[in-house]
Amino acid sequence: TLLILIINIMSSSSYQMDRMVYAELKKLPGNNICCNCSSQDTDWGCVKTGILFCTECSGRHRGLGTHISFVRSVKMDSWTDEQLAIMKLGGNDAFHSYLKKHHKGGGFTKSSPIKA
């Protein structure tokens, strides 16, 4: 049981996002701009959806609650390996494609309100 505990602690380690990892995330389609408003500032991410967005939109996402949008700063917050893996599987364009396919009215645009 001690070995399992050590493995769990090691696998759940968290650390600040490496610049190279962030650069890799920025290369995903659509991640060079905010997922919500198209701002060039994408210093925030949502662990639930794997999207990147700007500082202003991060505040709106935070207001939705962590059960909907778990917001992390790519520069100031710690990230677990699992969270980074989710971000690498996501991407702004992939998220918009999902919304267009599965939700009436498609994705959202700069004028779309962010609300629960």
Image (cartoon, rainbow, N blue to C red):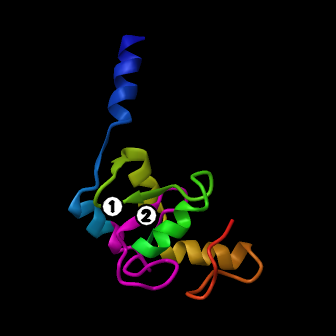
Location of mark 2 (residue): 45
* Residue drawn at x 63%, y 83% as measured from the top left: 112
Q: Is residue 62 magenta?
A: no
Residue 48, given in percent of the width and then of the height, sits at 54, 56
What residue appears at the point 47 percent right and 68 percent down from the top-left corner? 58
Using a 10 Å C-alpha cutoff, classify the residue at mark 1 as few (fewer than 14 neighbours), some (14 to 19) or many (20 or more). many
Q: In which quarter of the image is the N terminus?
A: top left
Q: Which of 79 and 62 is in front in this view?
A: 62
Q: Earlier in the sequence, mark 2 or mark 1?
A: 2
Percent x, y for residue 52?
43, 70
Spot the residue most to the top: 1
Q: Circles 2 and 1: CB distance less than 8 Å?
A: yes
Give the residue type that dot 1 points to. Val
- Where residue 37 sits in the image (x, y, percent)? 50, 84
Magenta-colored segment: predominant secondary structure = loop
Query: What is the crowding at mark 2: few (fewer than 14 residues within 10 Å), some, or many (at least 20)?
Result: many
Residue 39 colored in magenta in the image: yes
| Magenta-highlighted residues | 25-51
Dot 2 amino acid type: Gly
Q: Which is more toward the observer, 71 or 93?
A: 71
At mark 2, the secondary structure is strand
User: In this figure, which residue is indicated by the disc labeled 1?
Assistant: 74
